[in-house]
């Protein structure tokens, strides 16, 4: 098969295209997101999920260990049932506390996991017992105003 | 008054009827291309020539436009982000807007005007010179020999061109942001990597570019094959290729984006 200049150019073009794809995959994107196959699902119930979204990060000690997989409203209990997909390399004790936190003052919301001291580890399909809901700014302001008002009326007497 | 109304209704009816008719013949045309595509892959020399024609020759315009789009994104993004004190997010902004939207869309528009118009002109001229009829006379199937390799050449080139465009754009954003405006290099890359997901962002961008490539190539080939065999007919067909494929790319982009990126 004789080689021509067209072959060379097409070769250069295809190589450049594949290199660009590789650069995008490795340098620009993170290939480390948890796969369906190598993760396990854990549930938690929150009174208020705040601005948590599907695909929000789940962090242990500030490091991403999984993603939020699903959020549904449980109408019987009146709570938000959140499913996390956690990388199977990381194990958490059954008394882990899941809390919804905010990155920065106006940043996106994520789930922080604080580990407990239990020997047993969470398995696929388990539900976390202890959770801390998202902080709603209006409620805090309301409480603050209420306590201020109570303070003021206390001074008068 | 009645006459004008009558004429208007007739015109609308004619346009609708004609449009449906053309859609039908376009579908038949694409079925024929698909049916002969095995022939295109059995003769790699023809396919390679078409990849050269639509891919390699579009390389320069794609590289240069990608670089400049990245430079402009870097400048504009920096100006805006600086107001909120978050210039480090520049990497995320540049990479996400390129990989998700600008890469596939702008390279598809460039591809339509650079390679699509050339395909239409080539096929239209082959038709008006009766080269296609001559092939049929010699029992050479023009679909297998000419049209199907052209389609697959364009189909394979477009995703590669879009990837090159996005990579050049990110490089342009890096040049402006880090080298010239002094955003921290580590923050630029790490923020980008933290927020661009391989499957969600990059794979969806590649899917978009595949769809756009197929649409633009199909439109270009059909317009060329369907053009009236006159100088004016071919020139109108080339114009229609660019206009129709630009509109098709933008409409498809809206549809695909609403499927891909609004999942809660």
Image (cartoon, rainbow, N blue to C red):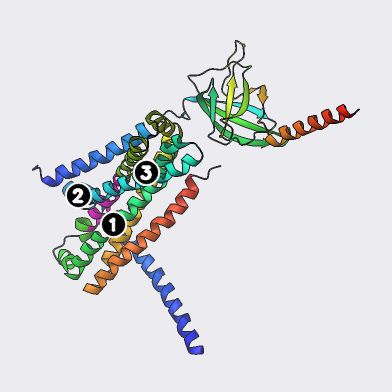
Which tag, 1 or 2, sits closer to the chain's start?
A: 1
Residue to which mark 1 is pinned:
B33
Using the image, name the chain to which the residue with label 2 belongs. B
Q: Which element carries disc 3, helix, strand or loop?
A: helix
Q: Nearer the viewer, mark 1 or mark 2?
A: 2
- Residue ID at (42%, 77%): B14
Both labels 2 and 3 in a single chain: yes
Residue B230 seen in this snapshot:
no
Q: Under tag 1, what secondary structure?
A: helix
In terms of sequence position, does the residue under pointer 1 or pointer 3 come before the other? Answer: 1
Q: Percent from the top left, x then y, of residue B169? A: 34, 43
Rendered image: mark on residue A149: none
Residue A120 position by quadrant: top right
Q: Which residues are magenta?
A: B147-161
Q: Closer to us: mark 1 or mark 3? A: 3
Q: Residue B41, how many percent across, how many down?
A: 22, 47
Image position, residue B98 (x, y; %): 39, 44
Residue B52, numbered circle: 2
Q: How would you rate the neighbour count of disc 2 (Cα within 10 Å): few for under 14, some for 14-19, many for 20 or more?
A: many
Separation of marks 2 and 3 at Cα, in angstroms: 21 Å
Do we see residue B188 in this rendering? yes
Crowd tier of the residue under label 3, counting other residues whose Cα lies within 10 Å: few below 14, some 14–19, many 20 or above: many
Principal secondary structure, stretch drawn in magenta: helix
């Amino acid at each position: 098969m004789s080689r021509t200049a067209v072959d060379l150019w097409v070769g250069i073009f295809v190589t450049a295209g594949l290199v660009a794809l590789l650069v995008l995959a490795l340098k620009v994107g993170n290939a480390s997101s948890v796969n369906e196959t190598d993760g396990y699902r854990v549930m938690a119930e929150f009174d208020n999920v705040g601005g948590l979204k599907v695909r929000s990060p789940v962090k242990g000690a500030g490091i991403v260990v999984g993603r939020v997989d699903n959020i549904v409203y449980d109408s019987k209990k009146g709570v938000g049932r959140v499913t996390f997909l956690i990388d199977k390399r990381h194990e958490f004790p059954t008394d882990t506390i899941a809390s919804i936190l905010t990155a920065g003052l106006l940043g996106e919301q994520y789930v922080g996991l604080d580990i407990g001291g239990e020997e047993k580890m969470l398995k696929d399909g388990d539900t976390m017992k202890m959770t801390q809901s998202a902080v709603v700014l209006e409620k805090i302001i309301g409480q603050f105003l209420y306590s201020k008002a109570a303070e003021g009326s206390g001074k008068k007497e | 008054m009645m006459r004008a109304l009558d004429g208007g209704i007739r015109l609308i009816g004619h346009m609708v009827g004609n449009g449906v008719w053309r859609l039908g013949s376009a579908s038949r045309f694409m079925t024929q291309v698909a049916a002969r595509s095995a022939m295109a892959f059995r003769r790699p020399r023809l396919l390679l020539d078409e990849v050269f024609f639509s891919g390699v020759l579009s390389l320069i315009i794609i590289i240069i436009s990608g670089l400049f789009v990245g430079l402009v994104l870097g400048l504009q993004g920096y100006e805006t982000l600086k107001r909120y004190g978050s210039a480090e997010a520049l990497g995320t902004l540049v990479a996400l807007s390129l990989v998700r939207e600008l890469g596939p869309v702008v390279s598809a528009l460039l591809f339509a005007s650079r390679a699509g118009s050339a395909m239409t002109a080539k096929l239209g001229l082959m038709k008006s010179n009766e080269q296609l009829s001559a092939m049929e006379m010699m029992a050479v199937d023009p679909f297998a020999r000419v049209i199907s390799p052209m389609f697959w050449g364009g189909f394979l080139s477009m995703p590669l061109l879009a990837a090159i465009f996005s990579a050049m754009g990110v490089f342009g954003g890096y040049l402006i942001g880090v080298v010239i405006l002094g955003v921290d290099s580590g923050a630029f890359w790490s923020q980008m990597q933290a927020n661009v997901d391989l499957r969600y962002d990059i794979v969806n961008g590649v899917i978009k570019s595949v769809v756009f490539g197929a649409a633009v190539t199909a439109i270009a080939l059909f317009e060329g094959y369907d053009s009236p065999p006159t100088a004016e007919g071919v020139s109108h067909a080339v114009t229609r290729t660019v206009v129709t494929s630009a509109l098709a790319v933008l409409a498809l982009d809206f549809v695909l984006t609403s499927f891909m990126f609004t999942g809660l």
